[in-house]
Structures are given as C-alpha cells and as structure tokens.
Image (tube, grey):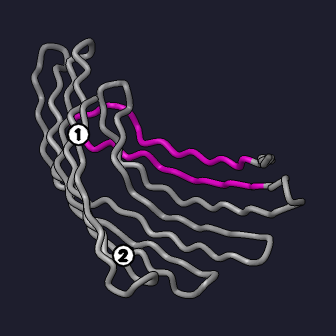
Amino acid sequence: VHAVSLGGAYDLVEDRLQFQTTGSYVNNHQPDISFRSQSLGVQAGFVYQISETLGAVLNGGPSYIIISSLDRGDHRRDEDLVWLGNASVTKEWERTAITGLVSRSLNPSGRGQLLETNRVSFLVGQELTESLIGNVQGSFSENIRSSSSASSANSKFWSITPSIDWRW
C-alpha cells in the first residue's frame, strides 16, 4: 500500500473553531491476487470546542475509487465516487469522559476487495485513581463491498472492550 496525504487547518475563531481540509491518494496493489485499488479524495470539516467540556468534529468529502482485478481470466474494472467522513462529540466531566463517533471509511480487505466501512462507536473513560483509568469501548461496524463485481457478502461486526490504563 502506498499513500500520501496533504492537509491544512485554519483557526476561524481562536481556540474554539477550526477549519480543516485534507487531500489523499492511496494505491493498494496486491499482485499475488491480481488486485489493485486506487482512491483520490478530499475531505473538509470543522473542529469546534463548544465549551470547556464539550467538543465536536465534523468532516467529510468525496473519494473517487478505481478497482481493477483479474477474476478467472476476466479483467474487471470498476469506478465509483463514494462519500466518506466522520462526526464525533466528546463530553468531559471532572473524572469522566464520553466520546461518540459515526464514520465511513475505505479499507482493503486483503482478499481482493475494497470495503466501505460504516462504524458507530463510543468510548467511556473514568478516572478511578490518580494513576488508574477504566475504559469501555464499544463499536458496531458494517463492511460493504465497493466493487460491484466482488463476490462475497457484506459483513457486520460488533465489539465491547473494557480496559484499565495505568499512568506513571
């Protein structure tokens, strides 16, 4: 996989509202399975610190993808324009923080497919002591094939992961 991205940010309102933009190119070539996907995209969005304890992020944009593969001697090529992005909200209290996230991204499957991944996730962190933080992270994701010629079914996953972090 070869990738390059370039972006910038501009403060619209000092320490409260920022505009961000990013352009990217990704070339995923897997010669052993005769698969190549390329994507060229741009995303723009905002980071907004609503208050001292509440923040939000919203960004998104189009990505033009080209998928080429060799399937049983038949060369296939698909082109598509997909919309990617994410939105998140973080709320902090004295010893607790909660983040919710909704996103759509592109990911190679490793089996000759490019997947659009839709994800909803959350993270809850609680400071138990000065050096211990307890976390619970939950996620639900759905992988959708970007190639109309791909042969496998869409898939759905969920997970809940508890963890303890220790700071020195």
- Label 2 Cα neighbours within 10 Å, binned few <14 / some 14-19 / many ≥20: many
Where is residue 131? Give x, y as percent.
Answer: 84, 53
- Which image quadrant is residue 99 in? bottom right
Residue type at the position of mark 1: Val
Residue 81 lies, with reference to residue 92, above or below; the image says above
For this rendering, which residue is in front, 156 or 38? Answer: 38
Q: Secondary structure at mark 1?
A: strand
Q: Nearer the viewer, residue 103 or 4?
A: 4
Residue 145 in the figure: left or right of residue 36: right
- The span picked out in magenta is 135-161
Which numbered circle lies on residue 26?
Answer: 1
Q: Which mark is residue 148?
A: none
Determine whether, in the image, residue 111 is placed left or right of residue 94.
left
Foreground disc of the pair 1, 2: 2
The secondary element bearing badge 2 is classed as strand
79 sits left or right of 149 in the view: left
Kindly identify which residue carries mark 2: 46
Quadrant containing the N terminus is: top left
The structure residue drawn at horizontal position 44% and vertical position 55%, both measured from the top left corner, is 118
Image point 64% across, 81% down: which residue? Answer: 53
Q: Is residue 148 left or right of residue 100?
A: left
Q: Amino acid at mark 2?
A: Phe
Q: Does the segment drawn in magenta span residue 6?
A: no
Which callout, 1 or 2, points at the residue further toward the start of the chain? 1
Identify the residue at horizontal 32%, vertical 72% (top origin): 45
**Residue 110, how many percent across, how many down?**
37, 26
- In depth, the one of 166 and 100 nearer the eye is 166
